[in-house]
Amino acid sequence: LLTAKAKALTWGGAWEAAVIVFCSCFFGGWFGLVFLLSIYMVIAVVDHILKDRTAKLLGGINKKHGPRDMVQVAANGLPATISIILYRITGEWAFLMGFAIGITEALADSIASDVGVLSKSDPISICRFRPVPRGLSGGVSLLGSLASLGAAALCAGLYFAFFWDLAGAGLLVLFGSLGCLIDSILGDLFQEKFRCDQCGCLTEKPVHCEKPTVRVAGIAHLDNCLVNIISNALAVAIGVLVLLW
């Protein structure tokens, strides 16, 4: 709940995160507790350090900015929570890996977004290969990609410290990065985007300059939170299926 006081999470998001931490500890033991808490702490610290700079850059673009709410916490933690519960029920190591993949993807995607927006050059659309506004879903930059890879490597290092499993650590980097790639593709091709008639800004907000915007791309109601949970769930599902196979 310290994350709520630090304004990294809303109070609702903090309580939901507490439930996810409890499930991770109860069903995943010391690994689940330490792994998840370590990742939440990294996200909270990065948010706290960068929030003022990113708020200025993303305030007019992102639909949701600031402390993460219950929907955002669920988008980043629900697939991993389901996977750790299935691990305790079935005893299949693949589901424990699924838990770690879900958390790894969530951290990598979050760090890529927070750090990538600080890139000196404009991001490039991952599918259309043209510059897009900073913070717009589907845009990638070298800085953001390196930050994402570093976050995935951090998770892999934590996993390796517990299990001394180099192959498993490598799979975390692979499937965590795959989830981020899926997130960028979905965000570029299918996430709804709007244009403000007042300033001409391309945004993810249905209201901009205090007036309704016009949807110009994407599927209606497919916002960033839905894209996040779809990409996270796909990364977990693909990783678990490959490991079970």
Image (tube, helix red, strand yellow):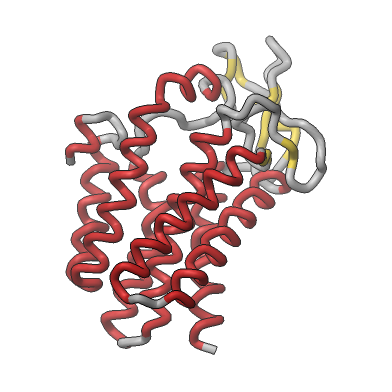
Residue 197 sits above or below residue 71 on the image: above
Left/right placement of residue 107 relative to residue 70 reads: right
Left/right placement of residue 237 relative to residue 222 reads: left
Asked whether residue 234 appears in the rendered view, the answer is no
Q: Position of residue 169 (x, y in %)?
A: 45, 70
Asked whether residue 167 appears in the rendered view, the answer is yes
Q: Position of residue 76 (x, y in %)?
A: 42, 52
Residue 218 sits above or below residue 98 on the image: above
Q: Position of residue 208 (x, y in %)?
A: 58, 18
Residue 241 sits above or below residue 65 on the image: below
Instruction: Please tell me which residue lies in front, 148 or 28.
Output: 148
Q: Quadrant of residue 68?
A: top left
Left/right placement of residue 27 relative to residue 153 reads: left
Residue shown at 39% from the left, 62% from the top: 157
Q: Quadrant of residue 84?
A: bottom left
- Specify the quadrant that holds the C terminus: bottom right
Q: Quadrant of residue 77?
A: bottom left
Q: Position of residue 50 (x, y in %)?
A: 42, 27
Badge count: 0
Residue shown at 34% from the left, 44% from the top: 42
- Specify the quadrant that holds the N terminus: top left
